Amino acid sequence: MSSRAHLLLPLLAPMLLGACGALSRLSEVGRPPEMSSITDPTRDPAWRPVTMPMPAARPAPAEANSLWRPGSRAFFKDQRAAQVGDIVTVLVNISDAANWQNASAANRNMDQVTGIPALFGLSNYLPKGVDPSKLLSVNSTGSADGTGSIKRNETVTLRVAGEITQVLPNGNLVVAARQEVRVNSELRELQVSGVIRPQDIASDNTVRHDRLAEARIAYGGRGQLTAVQTPRWGTQVGDILLPF
């Protein structure tokens, strides 16, 4: 491949990606976006088993005449989700607000006079009118003012049912939930994943989102309205590459 082709590849790559996206959108002209089929989340090529720090394994004591089974969390059978494939409902209730302001001011004044009244008798050779005690005079003034402000308000309230994809050695559960809702030509997608403790699951088989460790919550969509609100791929590439 010539050197000219190597130079053109970085320019052609965004165009090819944009063309693929355009073909996908052209295939949906005149009809709403297609909903994805129900699939096993563990068969997704991007899925990876979760590894977390685990306590050292301890052998369970033998209790031949006891009705209690080592490792059980309750004497009677618990109907809440506990095994791979069980369904648990995640309650997402995010109400986030941040208000941050900062101001700074700095001033500096400097006035310095430097002179050499006598230097090995060389001051006698200076031109007339030159005061050797005031050979150098320096003054400077500087000031800086800065202000900053951040205001953010986010509110998301959702309920989504997911399934347990993994039981960790310490008993914690890995949950993955995905939901798609199509209204007219707009498809809304909700994805929630994280690690929960079995005891945080309520009696109605629900768990709050703030009980999820390593929580990943995504709420977005695709369709005609999203396409109008999203900058074109050329604009996005320009924003990344242009230095000014």
Image (cartoon, grey):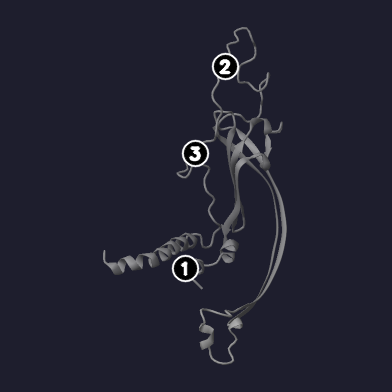
| Quarter occupied by residue 170 | top right
Circle 3 residue: 42
105 lies left or right of 138:
right
Circle 1 residue: 241
Q: Nearer the viewer, mark 3 or mark 2?
A: 2
- Residue situated furthest top in the rendering: 65
Number of labels in the image equals 3
80 versus 1 height, above or below: above
Q: CA distance from mark 3 to mark 1?
A: 37 Å
Task: Decide if residue 153 is in sight here.
Answer: yes
Kind of residue sitting beneath label 1: Leu
Q: Secondary structure at mark 1?
A: helix
Nearer to me, 53 or 66: 53
Nearer to me, 228 or 33: 228
On the image, the x and y values in percent for residue 48 come to 48, 40
Q: Earlier in the sequence, mark 3 or mark 2?
A: 3
Circle 2 residue: 60
On the image, the x and y values in percent for residue 95 come to 72, 51
What mark, if any, has residue 31 been given in the picture?
none
On the image, the x and y values in percent for residue 21 come to 47, 61
Q: Secondary structure at mark 3?
A: helix
| Quarter occupied by residue 131 | bottom right
Nearer to me, 116 or 199: 116
28 versus 40 height, above or below: below
4 lies left or right of 161:
left
Q: For mark 3, does the 10 Å Cα neighbourhood hold few (<14), some (14 to 19), or many (20 or more) residues?
A: few
Q: Earlier in the sequence, mark 2 or mark 1?
A: 2
Q: CA distance from mark 2 to mark 1?
A: 60 Å
